[in-house]
Amino acid sequence: MLDGLRLLAALMVVCYHYVALARPWGHSTDTIFPTAHKLAQYGWLGVEIFFLISGFVICMSVWGRTVGEFAVSRLSRLFPAYWVGILLTVVVVKMWPEVSSLHGWDTVITNLTMLQGGNNTPNVDPVYWTLFVELKFYLIMVVVVLFGVTYRNCLILCGVWTAAAALAPVLKTPLLTAFAMPQYAPFFIAGIAFYLMRRFRPNAVLWAIVVLQLLLAQRYIDYRLATNLGRAAVDALPTWPARLLIIAGFAVVGAIALGRFDRIQWKWLTTAGALTYPLYVIHMNIGMTLIHHFRNRIPAPLLVAGVTVLMLVAAWLLHRFIERPLGKWLRTTMRRGIDDVRQHVEPRRRHARRPAVSRAPATPAEAHEAHGTPVSAGTRTGGDSA
């Protein structure tokens, strides 16, 4: 069921970009999609649902793993589809620079590292900003792995992170704000708490964490509306649909944590979950370019439906022929590299921990002294008595 929710969240974001934004159409879409436009304006909340799911899934992923194993699993999962997504986006934008343009090849090259968000390099596709947020979350979880992934340490993380996220806007410390991520921390933390419920059992402490995060998540709805739709949207749009969607997201993930959907074992849900990430990394600039290019030739509802289906098919092809084989090769290669590092590091650690071995006594006198027994003068000199 978690896979199905991931696909639903991805389609919310797709709908937001294709139906709510003016950029692919050249003007406001309220006249093109009078009803759908009103709903699609809240599709950006699919990102928040992603973060909630990520908190659940990554907490599950780190359990029982070393830092190296966790890094291999994440990097081999993220980069293959991401690299191809960048290259496809560059080709489309270069051929049809209708809704976006490249900022230079140095920007493209930096984007290949997924670290562009840390050095003010523009994203090749605007949706890539969320990947840097995810990377920071992974780094936080690496700290937990270093201390040991336990029930207690996960609870400590939830408490410390909540405090840091609450204090960051007041302290205005750039480093703290960057890693505390006040706008998104409630979703990651709630996801962690939900996984602890799933792995162990629900209790008052975990429910208190979830409720607290649900309340804190409401604090930044106006900020997110302004970020996505402009400051005027904060005054023009009601916030209750956004609040309702956040509550619904918490409720569904909570039901998953409690096992309410365990009976649902539909095979297509696994495929749906596999399509989510490649769909996310290719849909925006490529899809919006297609809509802009054909907007005067194909009826708008048919065009949106056709581009969405095309993106889903492209996501499946990307998953089947790029992500799976390249991800497998990357996992194998990185594991060999980590094993090679361990072969060089572990012997040194064992040598450093090895206790000093005392030298065997060379003479009978030394043997007596080693055991604390007195020795005669003749014995000390090695033999003959006076």
Image (cartoon, helix red, strand yellow):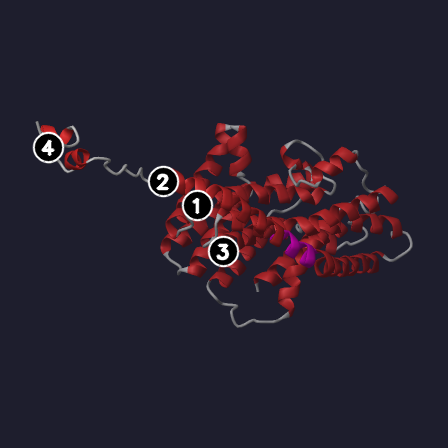
Write down the residue under mark 2.
Answer: 353
Q: Give how far across and how far down residue 84 sits, in percent.
A: 74, 49
Q: CA distance from mark 4 to mark 3?
A: 67 Å
Q: CA distance from mark 1 to mark 3?
A: 15 Å
Write down the residue under mark 4.
Answer: 375
The residue depicted at 58 percent of the width and 47 percent of the height is 337
Q: CA distance from mark 4 to mark 2?
A: 35 Å
Q: Mark 2 vs mark 1: which is more N-terminal?
A: 1
> Which residue type does callout 1 highlight?
Cys
> Quick one: quadrant of the C terminus?
top left
The residue depicted at 36 percent of the width and 40 percent of the height is 353
- Secondary structure, mark 2, is helix
Write down the residue under mark 1.
Answer: 158
Q: Residue 8 versus residue 115: which sits nearer the camera? A: 115
Range of magenta residues: 323-331
Q: Is residue 40 visible?
A: no
> Which residue type does callout 4 highlight?
Val
Residue 325 part of the magenta-drawn span: yes
Q: Mark 4 vs mark 3: which is more N-terminal?
A: 3
Please tell me whether mark 2 or mark 3 is closer to you in this view.
2
